[in-house]
Image: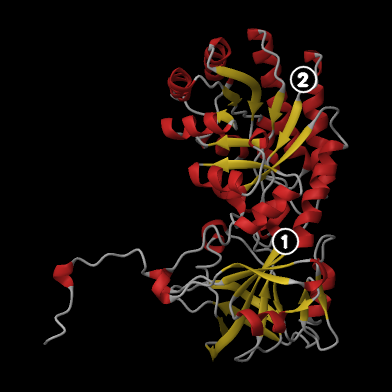
């Protein structure tokens, strides 16, 4: 239990963090004191850091471009964090877009992402969504048997052709040995991939590829395959990328179609990951993951004699450590040999703690120089257990103290809910030189119930 929050931060820091501790023992985020942020914008508060997000995007882009001989596009996975300001920031930085569904597609385009650098994913696309994608000129990663019929119908009505990749399902036996962290809940690597609803195995994909290749409604680009976040081991990425390349080569030889695009999806691991459930996993630089994956892919497709453009769809890597949650301590309760410190966020705000076993570092944001001298259960105030951090070493927390929950940039706000009628918090973006801008308004109680409709017959009789 020795050490302080400052000591912990020094141990877990990664290169793109913009976290520090000032002389008063207060955590600073992008150069701004956590206490000042809460004083201005309230608690709880989601704080995103512009420079961290941009640095992560630039680093993964460099990693791919340095290891691939053809063009590379980084398509930000909007599902990981759908804040419009962050999407606009990344569009300005040159990131394309990975979209799932109409809302993500429209928002991605509205924030300035060029349509030719956007891919639409999903295994249940409607005819209306297919038509919209064709009208906008975005690529469609075909992942359903009906999609070609929808494409041909829209082509007949509009004259537009669909830009298409075919999504493949690969099942490399070697994947089993690399599973760790939250991915274990899906079973072994191969079984997890087999049961996932996405992609087509080679026998089925061959039939669909022939139909796509022959259709005048289709501009066939290539293939997609989502690597997915199954492991931090570079060889896991190599196993999937290599199997993807082998499938591409086989399909090309059987049909004569040579792809001009290969989309290898997302799942790229960061050095500090809530997804690992607190397990001691050696941090792996993204460059090592990309090196292993692309070496295997290049070796597999070498007989094609051509180098397709490469698309990748990182989300969590870009935004994961680009945001943290600030929360204020409320009631502190001691009994049964335990201490519970309630804070004003809960697993409403971080539901992946309960659904995916995520494990987030929690720092004493306004007491970073105080010694860790207590074991605390950090909990939210809902009527569920809402355990944000069990048995955490921290200073003895008291009402009014401030804590910071790290690495909430991915799958936090997009999964957040309003259980117990609790409004969701505001979000801010810390920009260059400490400028702070509101990027999400805090909800009110009225907002929680704004879409509810009470039939007139249930209305109270105010005359009684």
Asked if marks 1 and 2 touch (Cβ < 8 Å), the reply is no
Please identify the quarter of the rendering in which residue 445 is found: bottom left
132 horizontally vs 317: left or right: left
Instruction: From this view, report whether residue 157 is shown above or below residue 52.
Output: above
Q: Specify few, some or many for label 1: CA neighbours under 10 Å numbering under 14, 14-19, or 20 or more.
A: many
Work out whether residue 359 can be spotted.
yes
Nearer-N-terminus badge (1/2):
2
Work out whether residue 124 can be spotted.
no
Position of residue 178 measured from the top left corner of the image (x, y, whole percent): 70, 42
Quadrant of the drawing holding the C terminus: bottom left
Report the coloring of the rendering. secondary structure
Position of residue 206 measured from the top left corner of the image (x, y, whole percent): 57, 15
Q: Nearer the viewer, mark 1 or mark 2?
A: 1
Position of residue 433 measured from the top left corner of the image (x, y, whole percent): 82, 70
Q: Circle 1 is placed at which residue position?
A: 321
Please identify the quarter of the rendering in which residue 460 is found: bottom left
118 horizontally vs 344: left or right: right
Nearer to the camera, 90 or 276: 90
The circle drawn on residue 301 is 2
């Amino acid at each position: 239990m020795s050490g302080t929050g400052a000591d912990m931060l020094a141990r877990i820091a990664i290169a793109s963090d913009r976290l520090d501790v000032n002389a008063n023992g207060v955590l600073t985020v992008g150069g701004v004191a956590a206490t000042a942020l809460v004083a201005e914008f309230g608690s709880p508060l989601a704080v995103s850091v512009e420079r961290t997000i941009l640095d992560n995007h630039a680093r993964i882009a460099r990693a791919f471009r340095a290891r691939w001989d053809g063009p590379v596009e980084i398509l930000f996975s909007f599902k990981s964090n759908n804040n419009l300001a962050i999407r606009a920031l990344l569009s300005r930085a040159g990131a394309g877009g990975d979209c799932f569904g109409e809302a993500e597609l429209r928002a991605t385009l509205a924030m300035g992402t060029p349509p030719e650098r956007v891919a639409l994913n999903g295994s249940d696309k409607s005819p209306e969504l297919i038509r919209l994608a064709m009208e906008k000129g975005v690529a469609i990663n075909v992942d359903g048997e009906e999609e070609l019929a929808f494409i041909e119908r829209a082509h007949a009505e509009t004259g537009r052709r669909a830009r298409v990749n075919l999504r493949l399902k690969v099942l490399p036996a070697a994947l089993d040995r690399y599973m760790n962290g939250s991915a274990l809940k899906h079973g072994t690597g191969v079984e997890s991939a087999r049961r996932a609803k996405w992609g087509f195995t080679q026998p089925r994909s061959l039939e669909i590829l022939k139909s796509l290749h022959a259709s005048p409604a289709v501009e066939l680009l290539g293939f997609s395959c989502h690597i997915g976040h199954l492991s931090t081991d570079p060889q896991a990425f190599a196993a999937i990328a290599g199997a993807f390349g082998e499938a591409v080569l086989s399909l090309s030889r059987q049909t004569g179609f040579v792809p001009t695009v290969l989309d290898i999806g997302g799942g790229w691991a960061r050095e500090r990951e809530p997804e690992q459930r607190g397990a001691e996993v050696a941090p792996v630089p993204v460059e090592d993951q990309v090196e292993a994956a692309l070496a295997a892919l290049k070796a597999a497709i070498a007989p094609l004699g051509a180098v397709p453009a490469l698309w990748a769809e990182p989300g969590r890597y870009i935004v994961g450590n680009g945001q943290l949650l600030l929360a204020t301590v409320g009631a502190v309760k001691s009994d049964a040999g335990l201490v519970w410190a309630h804070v004003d966020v809960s697993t409403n705000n971080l539901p992946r703690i309960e659904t995916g076993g995520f494990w987030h570092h929690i720092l004493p944001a306004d007491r970073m120089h105080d010694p860790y001298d207590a074991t605390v259960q950090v909990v939210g105030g809902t009527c569920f257990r809402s355990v944000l951090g069990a048995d955490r070493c921290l200073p003895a927390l008291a009402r009014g103290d401030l804590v910071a929950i790290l690495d909430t940039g991915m799958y936090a706000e997009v999964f957040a809910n309003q259980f117990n009628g609790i409004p969701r918090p505001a979000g801010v973006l810390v920009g260059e030189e400490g400028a702070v801008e509101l990027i999400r308004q805090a909800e009110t109680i009225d907002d929680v119930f704004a879409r509810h409709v009470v039939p007139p017959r249930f209305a109270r009789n105010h005359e009684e």
